[in-house]
């Protein structure tokens, strides 16, 4: 004779069985779907799937930067952070032979601190700070007229709050970090993050 299973115990066993089946069904149903985080990262890779215009008016396909680590910065000529041009140039110079470049995108969105045209911006950056890294045409980095590149950059890492916000993009085209205006380009925080994503030698 087997002992009788009490009704409460039997009900609990049945409930657990149903729960297990339900969980298994859920896992099977979602097995082919990417995690939400993975989906966001994949979308971010499209940051390099764009054509932009450089400071001289020439079209530049950002796909050409595949395999290169990038620091994308919204720059301005009349900002309290404008001296960061010098540190950005030093950063560019230090790591350019290791697969890195700075990309500067002038913007007049914050305090009207970039009122100049492309030719004046290029001359100012080169004359005052010795800038040799690529500069691009003036763009909107916020608001309804935000350019497609900054739409992609800010989707993953949040809005630009002021001039000289810095987005770090790895060689595969993924946006991996954002640094605010006050972060010095040569700070250990930024250079450490950069060195972690530089292309591997060999």
Image (cartoon, helix red, strand yellow):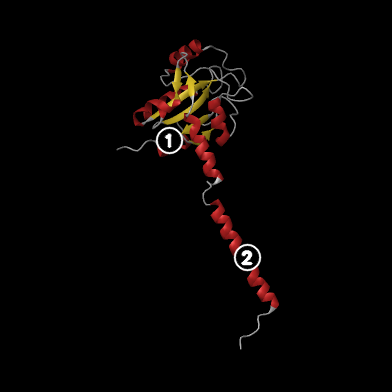
Q: Is residue 182 left or right of residue 192?
A: right
Q: Nearer the viewer, residue 121 or 6?
A: 6
Residue 28, image x, y percentages: 54, 55
Quarter of the picture holding the C terminus: top left
Residue 50 in picture, x, y percent from top left: 49, 26
At which x and y percent is residue 41?
Answer: 51, 39
Q: Which mark is residue 110?
A: none
Give the quarter of the figure containing the N terminus.
bottom right
> Residue 15 vs residue 87: left or right?
right
Q: Position of residue 14 (x, y in %)?
A: 64, 70
According to the image, label 2 marks what residue? 18
- Measure the C-alpha gap from mark 2 to mark 1: 44 Å
Q: Which residue is mark 1?
A: 172
Nearer the observer, 80 or 16: 16
Total residue callouts:
2
Q: Nearer the viewer, mark 2 or mark 1?
A: 2
């Amino acid at each position: 004779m087997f002992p009788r299973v009490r009704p409460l115990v039997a009900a609990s066993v049945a409930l657990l069985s149903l729960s297990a089946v339900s969980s298994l069904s859920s896992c099977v149903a979602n097995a082919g779907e990417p995690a939400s985080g993975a989906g966001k990262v994949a979308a971010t890779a499209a940051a390099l799937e764009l054509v932009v215009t450089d400071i001289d008016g020439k079209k530049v396909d950002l796909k050409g930067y595949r395999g290169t680590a990038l620091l994308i910065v919204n720059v301005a000529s009349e900002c309290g952070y404008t001296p960061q041009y010098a540190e950005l140039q030093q950063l560019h110079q230090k790591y350019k032979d290791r697969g890195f470049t700075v990309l500067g995108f002038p913007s007049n969105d914050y305090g009207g601190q970039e009122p100049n045209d492309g030719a004046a911006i290029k001359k100012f950056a080169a004359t005052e700070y010795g800038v040799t890294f690529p500069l691009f045409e003036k763009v909107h980095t916020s608001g309804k007229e935000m350019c497609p590149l900054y739409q992609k950059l800010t989707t993953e890492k949040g809005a630009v709050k002021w001039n000289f916000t810095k987005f770090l993009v790895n060689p595969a085209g993924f946006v991996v970090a954002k640094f605010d205006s006050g972060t010095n380009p040569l700070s250990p925080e930024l250079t450490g993050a950069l060195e972690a994503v530089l292309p591997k030698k060999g």
